[in-house]
Amino acid sequence: MSSASFLLLIRNSGADVHAHLTPEQRTALAGQWNDWFESLAARGQVAHANPLDTGGRVVSGPRGERVTDGPYAEGKEVVGGYFHLTVATLDEATAIAKQCPGLPLGMTVEVRQVIGQSPVLPEVRGSLAR
């Protein structure tokens, strides 16, 4: 079976989900994250994964005229990192997401397939050809 690309978007509630953990628990959790990544890498299921900084910029407006600092970890829900998987199906990517070490802390994982082109592109091309 051929493989497809999926992103696991790791989201947290915006609060410091680690605040209640002792230093030993934080160390153990970091080990769980590393073990999870390394097991996926050993099976050739992850292309790469990275945490994201808590700050950045948000660009909005029809012409990108609004640029604000953020998002911030204090926000309602923040993407804290991602895993780029190479697996066969959405079900396989979902099974991997269910193993996320952050789930017991209230994090959520959004599973999305990476596709080769925008899903609206065929419609746009069709309307341009008329």
Image (spheres, rainbow, N blue to C red):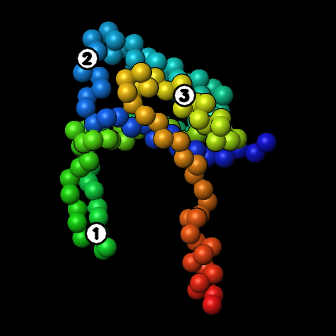
Front-lying residue, 34 or 118: 118
SS for dot 3: loop
Front-lying residue, 51 or 103: 103
SS for dot 1: loop
Q: Please state if 80 lies on the left or on the right of 83 as rendered.
A: left
Q: Please state if 33 lies on the left or on the right of 116 as rendered.
A: left
Place residue 16 in its image quadrant: top left
- Looking at the picture, how far across and down is residue 111, in whole percent? 53, 42
Q: Judge whether 12 appears above or below 31 on screen.
A: below
Residue hosting label 3: 98
SS for dot 2: loop
- Estimate the spatial distance between the alpha carbons at disc 2 and disc 1, rounded to whole Å: 38 Å
Q: Earlier in the sequence, mark 2 or mark 3?
A: 2
Number of other residues with Cα within 10 Å of mark 1, as a class: few under 14, some 14 to 19, many 20 or more: few
Residue type, mark 3 in image? Lys
Q: Which residue lies at the image location 63% right of the left edge and 73% below the top edge?
A: 122
Q: Which residue lies at the image location 58% right of the left edge and 71% below the top edge?
A: 121
